[in-house]
Structure formats: C-alpha cells, structure tokens
Image (cartoon, helix red, strand yellow):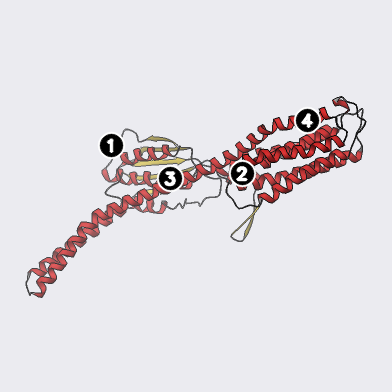
Amino acid sequence: MIEQGDGKMEIRSPMRAWRGFGKPKRSELYLRWSIYLMPLVMLPIAFLITNSRADQPHPPAATRVTLVVTLAAVLLDLRACGTSLDHYLNRPTDHRRWLLASGAFTVAGCWAVLLAHPVPDAPGGPAGQPFTAAIATILLSGGFGPLAVGLPLRWAFPVALGQILLVAPAMLLAGVTPGFAVGLLVGDAVGMPFVVASCRSFAWLTSVVWELDAARETQSRLAVAEERLRFSRDLHDVMGRNLTTIALKSELAVQFARRGRPEAADQMAEVQRIAQESQREVRDVVRGYRTADLHAEAIGASAVLRSADIACEIDLGEDADRLPTAVQSVLGWVIREGTTNVLRHSEAAHCLIRLRLEEGRAVLELENDGVPGLPRPSRGGGAGLPGLRERLAAHDGELTVPPARTGTFRVLASVPI
C-alpha cells in the first residue's frame, strides 16, 4: 500500500495499514466485507453448478455467458453494496444510480443466462432442467444485499419480489417446467428475508460502532471541558474577590487624592499588596499547587475511565499517604492529565496506574493500550506532556516515555521525596 503525506510517498504493508486503523474502522471493514460476501459467493456457486454434471456437458456458449454475466453481476452488486452502506452511514454517495444499475442488470442477466441455453424438450424431473435456472436464482439472491442496505425495508421487499416476478417468464421460455420454476422462485422469496435481515444487521452494527465512537469522542471533549470549567472556577475564586477589592480601594484612593488626604497612599499600598498576593495565587493555580489531590484524582480517573468502558487498574501502594503534600499534588496532576490523554488520544480497553517508591523517589507509572500502530515522536510529544514536564520540573521531577509494546503507551513520572 502506498500512502502520500506531507509530499512524501510511503510504502506500507496491508498488515501495517490494518494496525494503523482504529477500532471503528476495523469493525467497519469486517462488517462491510460480511455484506460483500453475499454477492461474492455467487461466483464459486455458479462455477460449481456449470461443472456439476460431467455426463451431460453444458454447451460452451451457455457456460461462457453464464460465467461472464455472473462476474459482471458480482462486480455491480459489490459496488452497489459499498455505496448503499455509505448512504446508510450518512455519507455522500450516489447509491441510487448503482442500485438501479445492479437491479436492472440482475433481471437482464437472468434473462440472458436462461435464454442462452433453452431446453424446450427437457424432461420433467429436476435433473433434466436447464442448469441456468439455478444460476438465475443465485443471481437474484445476490442482488438482495444492496437492496436491503440501500433502500428502506418497506421498499426493499417489494423491489426484490418484483425482480423475482420479472424473471419468471424467462424461466418458462427457457423450457423450465412451471412446477420447477415456481419451486425455485418461491425458494428465493423464502430466503430473501434472511438475506435482507443479515445484510441490514451488518449495516446497523456498523452504524452503531461509529455512533459509539462519536459518543466516546464527545465524552472525551466533555471531560476536557469539565477540567477547563474547574480551572475557570479556581481562577474566579482567586481573582474575583481580589479584583473587586482592588477596584474599590483604587476608587477610594482617587477620592482621597482629590481631597488631598494622606490616606490615598495607604490605600494604594493596600492595592499593591493585594495585586502581589493575587499574582502569587494565580501562579499557584497554574502550577497546580492548590487543588490536585492524589487519592481524589485516582478515584476520579477510575470513575471516568470505567464510564468510558475502559478497565482501570489503580495501585497506589501503602506509602501514598506518607508522601509530602507537594509530591502528592503534582502526582495527582499527572494522573489527571494522563487520564485526559487516554480518553482523547487512544482507544484503550485497559489502563494501569501504579505508584511505587524507588531510591528516595516516587515513581508513578501510567500505561494504556489502544494506541494505533503508527510512528510516535521519540520523546512522546503529546499535547499535555510538556505541561506535565513543567509541573514536575518545579519539584525536581521528570517525565519520561519509555519504549512499550506495540499498541501500548507508557509514561513514567518521577519525583524526589
């Protein structure tokens, strides 16, 4: 496979491309090919039927017409299935044109196959009937798939029944006895609901997979929005009262200054003190000194990940409570940001958060799977990682992204105790 990105051509193997797909894309490919299987199975069946009776070889012309018509019908049905599934998933497509071409060719192909080998004097038993009658029923069955996906069910069944009725005269003209023709067409009509239900179910499952992926993405954005709201509330709590006080004292200082009273200098000194205090408090909020609690963040991470259907394993050990408050706070920030990254940048099914003590340092390990098998920056330049490095650096800590198994992302945060 050749892909083009940033002006460069890259050759990627099918297996590598498959690993690069997310779960929704993989699920869609699997279900899409499950729908494609319905028309694809017509080719081997047609080949087996045309070569099923060695004692009565079929005319070469009829065999060639049968195989060519079957191959063309398969290709049209595959295209119609693809565009119909795209339409079902609300993607722009011209599915109606391909449905019309597929349906019209199915009926015309059945006529061509049947009339290519007429047997007006065929015996009455099934063994003496034209082999093309069975081919026609196979062509009809293969065409049910696109109709099931591309049309509403209230239209799919009448259209499919109409195709069956249009093929019936061709069977009679080809020498198929009425009883045998009725048996084949009734069998098609009976099997039609099973074909329609199967293909429609695959399309519905594909739609559900993408809807779940969209819901998960929405949940990730909501988690980020909730964090931003929390940060906004902290800033409001810190700055709201102080700015109001500054405004009032500044106005009072102006009034004193206009009257020539010495209290104006005292008020401005108070304004300066409040401004400096506000600056310090804002710095504390930005660095995360005020709110992040290790145990609270661990509990919150567990709840958020499990609500996103991600199995979460958290092990803070027995020494977490004995860590200094500043160390607990900065590690709590690592858990918070790491959880946000898991939700936003992976399709994880399992996440591990583990804390251990090593040589006078607290080491917090975060590991998750569900990372697409694409090349990653060597230093792990995720969107939230630079901010975490800054927080840890303020405590002489460090953040590293060591090598991990394929499809796994691992982060180590180390802080001296």
Please tell me which residue lies in front, 112 or 403: 112
Q: Distance between the residues labelled 4 and 2?
A: 41 Å
Q: What's the residue at 73%, 39% (across, down)?
A: 162
Side (left or right) of 202 relative to 392:
right
Q: Do the residues labelled 1 and 2 touch (CB within 8 Å)?
A: no
**Amino acid at circle 2:** Trp
Q: What element carries label 3?
A: helix
Q: Is mark 4 on a helix, strand or loop?
A: helix
Estimate the x, y position of residue 233 in percent, counting from the top left: 28, 52
Residue marked by disc 4: 184
Q: Nearer the viewer, mark 4 or mark 2?
A: 4
Precedes in sequence: disc 4 or disc 2: 2
Please tell me which residue lies in front, 146 or 390: 146
Q: Are marks 3 and 1 in contact (CB under 8 Å)?
A: no
Estimate the x, y position of residue 110 in percent, counting from the top left: 81, 40
Q: Quadrant of the C terminus?
A: top left
Q: How far apart are marks 1 and 2 (CA)?
A: 45 Å
Precedes in sequence: disc 3 or disc 1: 3
Q: In which quarter of the image is residue 199?
A: top right
Q: What element carries label 1?
A: helix
Q: Residue 150 carries which label?
A: none
Residue marked by disc 3: 219
Q: What's the residue at 24%, 57% (across, down)?
A: 239
Q: Distance between the residues labelled 4 and 1?
A: 77 Å
**Amino acid at circle 3:** Gln
Q: Distance between the residues labelled 2 and 3?
A: 26 Å
